[in-house]
């Protein structure tokens, strides 16, 4: 039995994963015809419906951070999900990345005070499909327990951008035999400039539409 999700209906074999429950609702309304809530347990909102491609698609929130995301992913695998794309946010480490820009993840690793963990990679076929749908910067991403640690932000050599769960999702997906890819929205520049809420919604819709077409 799943440990976190308590679905009220069957899920699709393909899913879009977001951290924020509010973004799950936003993308469900944007991408699905007559979306039905398929999970509300623990505030991890999930929705399933027919996408523009004619196929069933699930949009599921994973919560904050790598541990929550990895648990939810394992639950999704038990419930029949086989392919997934993460649509998330990140903080730029590369000063050339601007708020609102989309980042296609080509590799990810955990980052701690001791340095970088082993790199993990997204599914190549799913990433290639996502690349065809996007005009995005391709990037290596460092995943941290928290993006800000009293001024000890990950250094530029950690990667092009930092987030809180992509590395955990890719690693757990490989263990589960699931195909995963990821596209991230730059929510904050390396200089600390943040993305306005309405622009963040627009960027999420662009990323979500690309993910829905790619999967």
Image (cartoon, grey):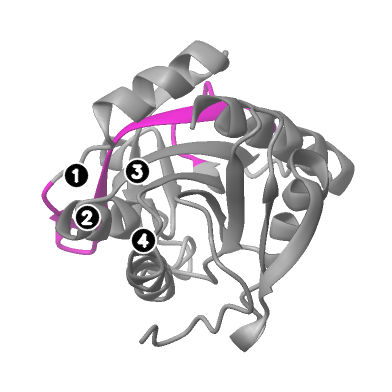
Residue that sits furthest to the left in the current view: 118
Rounded to the nearest whole Å, what is the CA distance between mark 2 and mark 4? 14 Å
**Along the viewing direction, whichever of 108 and 204 lies nearer the viewer:** 204
Give the numbered dot on residue 120.
1
Residue range corresponding to the magenta coloring: 92-118
Q: Which residue does the numbered mark 4 point to in the structure image? A: 144
Q: Earlier in the sequence, mark 1 or mark 4?
A: 1
Residue with the mark numbered 2: 171
Residues at circles 4 and 3 in contact by the CB criterion of under 8 Å: no
Q: Quadrant of the N terminus?
A: bottom left
Front in this rendered view, residue 199 or 192: 199
Measure how far apart labels 4 and 3 are at the Cα level. 19 Å
Question: How far apart are the alpha carbons under marks 3 and 2?
Answer: 9 Å
Q: Please report contact status of discs 2 and 1: CB closer than 8 Å, yes or no.
A: yes
Q: Secondary structure at mark 2?
A: helix
Whether residue 22 is visible here, answered yes or no, is: no
Q: Nearer the viewer, residue 67 or 54?
A: 54
Q: Do the residues under discs 2 and 4 have CB atoms within 8 angstroms? A: no
Q: Residue furthest right?
A: 198
Residue 99 in magenta? yes
* SS at mark 1 in the image: loop
**Against 135, is 139 above or below?**
below
Q: Is residue 147 above or below residue 74?
A: above
Classify residue 148 as left or right of residue 169: right
Q: Are marks 3 and 1 in contact (CB under 8 Å)?
A: no
Q: Nearer the viewer, mark 2 or mark 4?
A: 2
Left or right side of 117 for 160: right
Residue 36, x across and y down, in percent: 76, 63
Between the residue at mark 2 and the residue at mark 1, the CA separation in whole angstroms equals: 6 Å
- The x, y position of residue 76, in whole percent, is 41, 66
The answer to which of marks 3 and 2 sits earlier in the sequence is 2
Q: Residues within 10 Å of mark 1 (few under 14, many from 20)?
A: many
């Amino acid at each position: 039995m799943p440990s976190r999700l308590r679905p009220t209906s069957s899920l699709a074999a393909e899913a879009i994963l977001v951290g924020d429950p509010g973004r799950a609702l936003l993308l469900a309304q944007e991408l699905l015809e007559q979306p039905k809530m398929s999970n509300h347990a623990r505030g991890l909102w999930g929705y399933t419906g027919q996408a523009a491609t004619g196929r069933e698609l699930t949009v599921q929130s994973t919560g904050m951070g790598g541990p929550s995301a990895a648990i939810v992913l394992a639950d999704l695998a038990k419930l029949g999900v086989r392919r997934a794309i993460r649509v998330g946010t990140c903080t730029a480490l590369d000063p050339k990345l601007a708020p609102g820009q989309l980042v296609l993840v080509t590799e990810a690793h955990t980052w701690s005070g001791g340095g970088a963990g082993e790199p993990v990679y997204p599914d190549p076929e799913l990433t290639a499909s996502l690349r065809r749908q996007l005009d995005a910067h391709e990037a290596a991403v460092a995943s941290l327990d928290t993006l800000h640690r009293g001024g000890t932000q990950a250094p530029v050599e950690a990667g092009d951008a930092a987030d809180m769960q992509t590395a955990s999702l890719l690693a757990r997906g490989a263990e589960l035999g699931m195909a995963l890819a990821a596209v991230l929205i730059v929510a904050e520049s390396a200089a600390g400039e943040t993305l306005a809420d309405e622009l963040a919604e627009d960027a999420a819709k662009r990323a979500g539409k690309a993910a829905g077409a790619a999967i």
